[in-house]
Image (spheres, grey):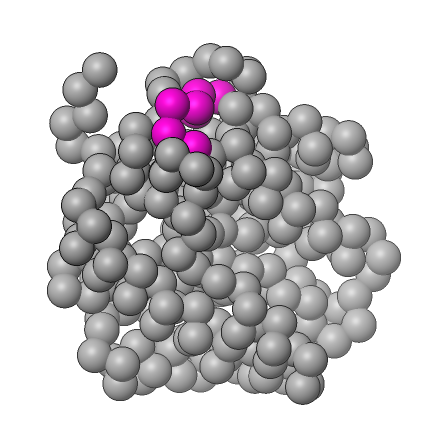
């Protein structure tokens, strides 16, 4: 099979993506202490852009025009609260409230290459159901990542994610997927969060992909928000989203982004 247009790279290119991923991971650690009740989401966005540019990189989302949109995205971060699954807009009028969950999604561009990452944070004290949603969604990401190796099937990733999520009676959208990432923010192939074991394309060595389960408490159905950007659960149930940028290796997945800076920051909050 030919992989034309897929992000299959040489080691020197992967090293640049890894450097972008390092900046992105440290950004999340930098933002973590500020993701608290009362935080202004526009201020978080400004902090993120300043950090990325200070590191010599560029915010990959800002000015990016997805193929399904008629205008470029205007912010550095996507800030998605509660029932917002993805693409929530930062705003000076939006402040975080205790009990909410908020997904921060961000991309970094460095020397023409991209990395992508997302993490859903609790804001203050959250409900047991919300805490379980965060735990299950993050674990589903790792279960998907553990399926990655050169020669494995794409369907193995989606099967591992969906099978685990379903065991907790949560839902996974079949309309939102992970993706290839590298010289562009979104590249083929799609990386679905639903799949059948042993089905789909085989993963080539040195393919770079973003794996990102998006999990709902209620129905899997989604809809567009009134702001024209955000994607929400149709039944207004809570949604969580975790994402890593990984490289397909013969021995398994090389995870380029890291949640460790977040965990270190949380330990000191």
Residue at the far right: name it: 128
Q: Position of residue 55 (x, y in %)?
A: 27, 81
**With respect to residue 132, does 50 lie above or below?**
below
Residue pictured at 26% horizontal, 85% vertical: 54
- Most frequent secondary structure within the magenta stretch: loop
Q: Is residue 44 left or right of residue 1?
A: right
Foreground pick, 233 / 20: 20
Q: Position of residue 52 (x, y in %)?
A: 30, 77
Residue pictured at 52% horizontal, 32% vertical: 147
Q: Position of residue 268 (x, y in %)?
A: 67, 86
Residue pictured at 72% horizontal, 52% vertical: 135
Q: Is residue 4 left or right of residue 35?
A: left
Q: Quadrant of the N terminus?
A: top left
Residue at the far front: name it: 251
Residue pictured at 46% horizontal, 34% vertical: 148
Q: Is residue 3 left or right of residue 179?
A: left
Q: Position of residue 159 (x, y in %)?
A: 58, 24
Q: Is residue 110 left or right of residue 227?
A: left
The answer to which quarter of the image holds residue 6 is top left
Q: Which residues are magenta?
A: 149-155
Q: Quadrant of the C terminus?
A: bottom right
Foreground pick, 247 / 101: 247
The answer to which quarter of the image holds residue 23 is bottom left
**With respect to residue 194, does 258 lie above or below?**
below
Residue 227 appears in the rendering: no
Q: Is residue 60 magenta?
A: no
Q: Is residue 150 magenta?
A: yes
């Amino acid at each position: 099979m030919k992989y034309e247009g897929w992000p299959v790279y040489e080691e020197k290119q992967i090293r640049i993506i890894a450097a972008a991923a390092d900046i992105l991971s440290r950004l999340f650690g930098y933002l973590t202490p500020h993701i608290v009740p009362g935080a202004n989401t526009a201020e978080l966005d400004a902090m993120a852009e300043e950090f990325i540019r200070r590191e010599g990189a560029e915010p990959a989302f800002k000015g990016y025009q997805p193929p399904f949109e008629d205008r470029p995205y205007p912010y550095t971060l996507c800030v998605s609260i509660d029932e917002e699954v993805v693409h929530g807009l930062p705003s000076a009028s939006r402040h975080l409230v205790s009990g909410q969950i908020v997904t921060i999604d961000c991309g970094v561009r460095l020397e023409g290459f991209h990395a992508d990452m997302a993490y859903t944070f609790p804001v203050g004290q959250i409900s047991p159901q919300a805490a379980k949603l965060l735990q299950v969604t993050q674990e589903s990401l790792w279960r998907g990542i553990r399926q990655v190796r050169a020669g494995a099937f794409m369907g193995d990733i989606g099967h591992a994610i969906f099978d685990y999520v379903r065991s907790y009676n949560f839902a996974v959208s079949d309309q939102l997927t992970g993706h290839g990432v590298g010289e562009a923010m979104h590249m083929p192939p799609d990386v679905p969060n639903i799949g059948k074991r042993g089905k789909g394309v085989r993963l080539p060595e040195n393919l770079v992909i973003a794996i990102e389960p998006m999990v709902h408490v209620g129905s899997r159905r989604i809809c567009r928000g009134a702001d024209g950007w955000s994607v929400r659960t149709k039944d207004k149930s809570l949604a969580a989203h975790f994402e890593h940028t990984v490289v397909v290796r013969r021995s398994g997945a090389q995870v380029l982004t890291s949640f460790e800076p977040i965990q270190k920051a949380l330990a000191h909050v």
